[in-house]
Amino acid sequence: MFAVTVFASPAFAQQGYPTKPILFVIPFAAGGDSDLSGRNVAQQASKYLNNRPIVPFNRVGSSGIIGAMSVKNAAPDGYTLLVARIATHAVLPAIDAKLPYKWNEFTMISLIELNPYICFVKTDSAARTATDLIAAMRKSPGKLNYSTAGSGTSQEMAAQYFMSLGGLTKDHAVGIHHKGGGEVTTAVMGGQVDFACNNAPTVIAQAQGGRVRPLLVTPQRLKELPDAPSAKEAGFPDMEKIVGWTALMGPAGLPKPIVDKWADVFQKLSKDPDWQAGNARIGGIAAIRSPAETEKYVREQYEMYSKLAVALGMRP
């Protein structure tokens, strides 16, 4: 009884946790958004956690499922946490009814950062604005195409959401699948496709070099592309929901004192110049939120992609 009482005591948990290294499971390969974001948090958060090491570990496979499941099945003691992504907790749960976990079978700790998206065309495209592009697709259904990193990827979902906001159906443009985000951008540059929506880091340098023309950026204007309109300015305010994002989560049942401890750590990180500088270097927009706000945000993302998946015939 004594041991249980001590563990449940908020004062004990705040003072005693952590007493050993913490594992950050990153469900994607090194160098990606989740990897860079997770490592930035791991590097800077340690000083607010008794200087205990935080060890990032890339547990890759099955589009993030393997890493997510390893945390879902871990002991809820705060020593195994997940650097979750939009893919693991919004897109995949929305399109795969057989996924071995649900988006809400985790303890939400904090949203970390957002990754801007850009919808763009080749520089010599007749579409000068996002409205022009929608009008061209409406005029000639099925004639235009766009590049994606595969069926059900964020690039495909972003393009289809953009089309839906313009009052178009999924068949007004044809998706051409490629192997990764880099090829999504180069396909537009090379004229193999008419447009794409992609993660900003793969597009910014090409836009700055005049090889592609941004039609809108999400969720706000980017300092690197000061002339590119935001989604709201382009007339598609709901496209602001199309962003990449990273969050920290734990197994279900993570004790509240440990969640509160991490909430305090993230509040300190939000004011930490080293964390802010690291986040800026990887192109992230700081988005630290409370556990409740994080759960609300992830729920809204899951529900949005679920509706889109049904409209696209990806699930009943």
Image: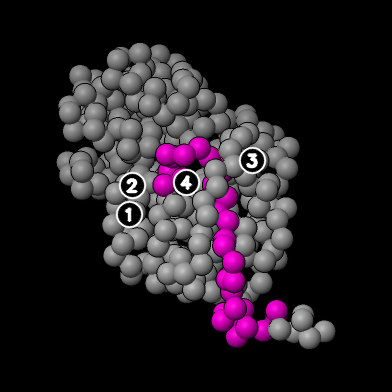
Residue found at the very far right of the displayed protein: 1
Q: Amino acid at mark 4?
A: Ser
Decide which of 216, 33 is in the foreground and name it: 33
Which of marks 3 and 2 precedes in the sequence? 3
Structural crowding at the residue carrying mark 1, measured as other residues with C-alpha within 10 Å and reported as few (<14), some (14–19) or many (≥20): some
List x then y, in percent, for residue 103: 64, 51
User: Taking 8 as reference, is 85 above or below it?
Assistant: above
Q: Which mark is residue 282?
A: 2
Quadrant assignment, res 139: top left
Q: Amino acid at mark 3?
A: Ile
Q: Amino acid at mark 2?
A: Ile
Quadrant assignment, res 33: top left
Q: CA distance from mark 1 to mark 4?
A: 13 Å
The residue where tag 1 is placed is 278
Q: CA distance from mark 1 to mark 3?
A: 27 Å
Q: Nearer the viewer, mark 1 or mark 3?
A: 1
- On the rendered image, what quadrant is the C terminus found in? top right
List x then y, in percent, for residue 81: 59, 57
Which of marks 4 and 2 precedes in the sequence? 4
The residue where tag 4 is placed is 34
**Residue 253 in the figure: left or right of residue 20:** right
**Residue 253 in the figure: left or right of residue 174:** right
Q: CA distance from mark 2 to mark 1?
A: 7 Å
Q: Are marks 2 and 1 in contact (CB under 8 Å)?
A: yes
